[in-house]
Amino acid sequence: MAKSLEQIAKQNGIKYFLISFVDLFGVLRAKLVPARAIKGMQKNGAGFAGFATWLDMTPAYPDMFGVPDPDSLIQLPWNKEIGWLASDLWMDGKEVEVSPRIILKRQLAKAEKAGYFMKTGVECEYFLINQEGTSIFDPADTQKKPCYDQQALMRQFPVIKEISDCMLELGWGPYQTDHEDANGQFEMNWDYDDALKTADRHVFFKYMVKSITEKHGIRATFMPKPFVNLTGNGCHTHVSVWDKTGKKNLFLKKSDDLGLSKLAYDFLGGIMHNATALCAIFNPTVNSYKRIDALCTLSGATWSPSSVTYTGNNRTHMIRVPADGRFELRLMDGSTNAYLSQAGIMAAGLDGIKNKRDPGEPLHINMYEEGHKVKSAQKLPVTLLDALRLLENSKELRSEMGDEFIDSYIKLKMLEWRDYTSHLSDWERQNTLDC
């Protein structure tokens, strides 16, 4: 083993380790392990019952083991006694096929075999709300256009500073925080990196934000659309592909109008070809579809896509190219599974490269005002059920990501959809009691 977690614990004063994984629904699971036991856990993994999580298993399945990745170790800046570790799931001496981190690592291994190395950065948006989740935390945050509101930002300075200080200490390279387009909404950005590292940090970031805000008596939510009249939480992802050394950007072509290479356009074509099916992964909750193609919000725009289109530096499209050599995918929302999201991008991109998918010409129009004129653009699904059916029937994503994962994911998400449809809402009572 390249790194001894036992030795690292002694050197850094770590007394406990959180050996963590996320299931197919993106729920963060963990065992708390004292440092005295970490040597055995590093070798054999921490034991879990897979049925107790969203991994499509039964109580008859044997023990599942989370084998920690020492390269993922994060010592909690707000509690130095604890070290957090991402783990890979194993059962009966084999990798668990439906483990999200394993799914991502396999996609990245396919890419590496073809000579590609994906780098990504995520823009995580979240709301600060009251404990009941019924309103935003700051009652003074009332502007119709609150984006970049300095007063509202600085009223939350103690909690924002603590989160930012943690990222600085961890070496993530945070470079900006802003009050976002909705009242009570914030976004924090850190440096892009290889896709696995970005995914691990994305998982930890959500845990960190929730933990630190709790200390301040605030609740944080990444829910896609917690308030009908306000802009939803996105998780925009910036994507570029490099050579295996990670030093040459293979997406970059200075002479192109958008600064993209042929490889980048093929990759982009793969994303667009598979976008509607990928919604089931990028937008994985019932609530996600209240963000996509939403009604106009208090600020005047939803900032969410409704069609599969791309453009230059124009935020009304699903994909924009803000600078040479990369693109921003604006489809994902705050509920997306950090590992499956990155795996979906890579799977669609590899499909695009393999089949030379043509994304067509970019559209340089305001999609919010003129989108109805673009008859050729595919519409994004409007419910989770629509998205799940598209994913279930996607030959391309089955080929890239595997039948076992797709079938398990569809099975569990359909249970969630049925649970939702069995719920009786106030809207139904108000509109159909007298029918």
Image: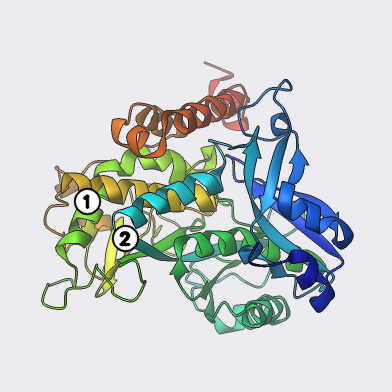
Residue 345 vs residue 194, the one in the foreground: 194
Q: State the colouring used for the structure image.
A: rainbow
Q: Which dot marks residue 307?
A: none
Question: Quick check: marks 2 and 1 in contact, CB under 8 Å?
Answer: yes
Whole-percent x and y of residue 174?
A: 55, 79
Does residue 337 appear to the left or right of 114 in the view shown? right
Q: Which residue sits at x=33%, y=34%?
A: 399
Does residue 104 appear to the left or right of 263 in the view shown? right
Residue at numbered disc 2: 116
Spatial CA span between label 2 and label 1: 11 Å
- Give the amino acid at mark 1: Ile
- Give the amino acid at mark 2: Tyr
Q: Secondary structure at mark 2?
A: loop
Nearer the camera: disc 2 or disc 1? 2
Residue 226 versus residue 316 in the image, above or below: above
Whole-percent x and y of residue 250?
A: 24, 68
